[in-house]
C-alpha cells in the first residue's frame, strides 16, 4: 500500500507498507472524495504518513494502546 504525504490520492506517495507491517495510528481525516484516511507511524522506521482506511486492519489496534 502507498503511504502518502496527505489524506488523498492527490498527495505524493513517499513510502509503502507491506502486509503485516506494524503501525501506530496517530490521526484520521477525510479526502475531498469523502474517503477515510488514517495517519500512521511505522515504529521500526519512524516514518509518518497517510494510508486509506480500507487498507488497514484495526482489529489489533487495541493491543497497542493497552
Image (cartoon, rainbow, N blue to C red):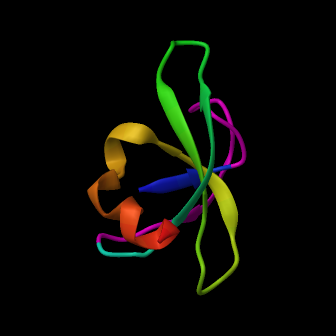
The relative height of residue 45 versus residue 58 in the rendered view (above or below) is below
- Taking the view exactly as shown, the residue that stands out farthest to the top is 33
In the rendered image, residue 13, in percent from the top left (x then y), is placed at 62, 52
Q: Which residues are magenta?
A: 5-19
Quarter of the rendering containing residue 41: bottom right
Please, what is the dominant secondary structure of the magenta stretch? Answer: loop
Residue 8 covered by magenta stretch: yes
**Image quarter of residue 25:** bottom right
Q: Is residue 57 visible?
A: no
Q: What is the count of numbered marks?
A: 0
Tell me, yes or no, if residue 29 can be seen here. yes
Q: In which quadrant will I find the N terminus?
A: bottom left
| Picture coordinates of residue 14, whole percent (x, y) | 67, 59
Q: Viewed as shown, does residue 1 lie left or right of 20?
A: right
Identify the residue shown where x is 63% and y is 34%. 7
- Residue at 69% over, 71% down: 47
- Camera-nearest residue between 39 and 33: 39
| Residue 49 spot, x, y in % from top left | 66, 55
Taking the spot 52% from the left edge, 12% from the top edge, the residue there is 33
User: Is residue 28 found inside the magenta-colored segment of the image?
Assistant: no
In this orientation, which residue lies closer to the viewer: 20 or 12?
A: 20
Q: Quadrant of residue 59?
A: bottom left
Question: As drawn, which residue projects farthest toward the bottom?
Answer: 44
Amino acid at each position: 500500500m502507498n503511504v502518502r504525504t496527505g489524506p488523498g490520492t492527490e498527495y505524493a506517495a513517499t513510502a509503502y507498507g507491506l502486509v503485516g507491517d506494524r503501525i501506530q495510528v496517530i490521526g484520521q481525516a477525510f479526502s475531498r472524495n469523502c474517503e477515510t484516511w488514517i495517519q500512521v507511524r511505522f515504529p521500526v522506521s519512524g516514518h509518518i504518513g497517510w494510508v486509506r482506511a480500507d487498507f488497514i486492519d484495526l482489529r489489533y489496534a487495541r493491543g497497542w494502546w493497552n
